[in-house]
Image (spheres, coloured by chain):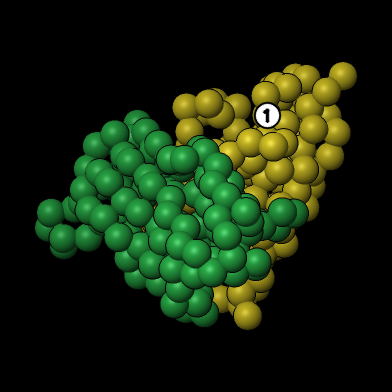
Chain colours: A green, B yellow
Amino acid sequence: DIVMTQSPDSLAVSLGERATVNCKSSQSVLYSSNNKNYLAWYQQKPGQPPKVVIYWASTRESGVPDRFSGSGSGTDFTLTISSLQAEDVAVYYCQQYYNTPITFGQGTRLEIK
Amino acid sequence: EVQLLESGGGLVQPGGSLRLSCAASGFTFSSYAMTWVRQAPGKGLEWVSAISGSGSTYSADSVKGRFTISRDNSKNTLYLQMHSLRAEDTAVYYCAKGAALTMIFENWFDPWGQGTLVTVSS
């Protein structure tokens, strides 16, 4: 199984500042035949189901604000929120869909400082 | 608008059984893989089972032999039959749609239902 490890476990950032969440996979999730990274990011607000924000490691889901961006390749990935807003408070999860079983990171709790 | 509505959760004793349902609408149900993901109270996300549009299935080792995923494309409904339930199966169970039409098990999920709580306790 591919193990997904996120860092940090929790993060407090001031409004308007940059927030960065990291995700590392135990093996590469880059599929060489199409040069795509099989990595998604989800946002889960309290009492709500997860919502995808990024897929293919860097493709923003429709309707997601452009302050959200994803980067990285192979085994190391980053979710960046360029200017934190109050509504971004949530737990963020990375997920690999390179192979089964599908696996998620343990989550990163993002709060306002 | 794509909608997923889970039902069937509740309190069950250890060793008991339960069947979850997920009613889907707003898309061509039979064309998409569907999946169940669970979340224990205060914990992270754990993928449980997936099923292709044609009925091929794949399950996590933690539930293999106890849980069975199925679907009825005529009713636009996804199911999860759970047997031999354990305390560690206590979680909110979400159904989710495979986001990419051309991908089966290796997929991201969009959208997710609101979830149904399963509590295994005596």
Against B59, residue B28 (above or below) is: below
| Mark 1 Cα shell of 10 Å, populated few (<14), some (14-19), many (≥20) | many
**Secondary structure of residue under mark 1:** helix
Q: Residue at 33%, 41% (x, y): give it.
A: A24
Q: Nearer the viewer, residue B91 or A75?
A: A75
Q: Nearer the viewer, residue A95 or A69?
A: A69
Q: How many numbered tags mark residues here? A: 1
Q: Residue at 57%, 60% (x, y): give it.
A: A14
- Residue B61 visible somewhere in the drawing: yes
Q: Nearer the viewer, residue B66 or A90?
A: A90
Q: Position of residue A76 (x, y in %)?
A: 27, 46
Task: Give the amino acid type for the residue marked by disc 1 in the picture.
Answer: Asp
Against B2, residue B65 (above or below) is: above
Q: Quadrant of residue B63?
A: top right
From the viewer's perspective, tell me whether residue A58 is left or right of residue B19. left
From the viewer's perspective, tell me whether residue B81 is left or right of residue B28. right
Q: Residue at 37%, 45% (x, y): give it.
A: A23
Q: Position of residue A1 (x, y in %)?
A: 35, 31
**The C terminus of chain A, quarter of image:** bottom right
Q: Nearer the viewer, residue B38 or A16?
A: A16
Q: Quadrant of residue B19?
A: top right
Mark 1 falls within which chain?
B
Q: Residue at 65%, 66% (x, y): give it.
A: A86
From the viewer's perspective, tell me whether residue B116 is left or right of residue A44. right
Q: Which residue is mark 1?
A: B89
Q: Position of residue A105 (x, y in %)?
A: 46, 41
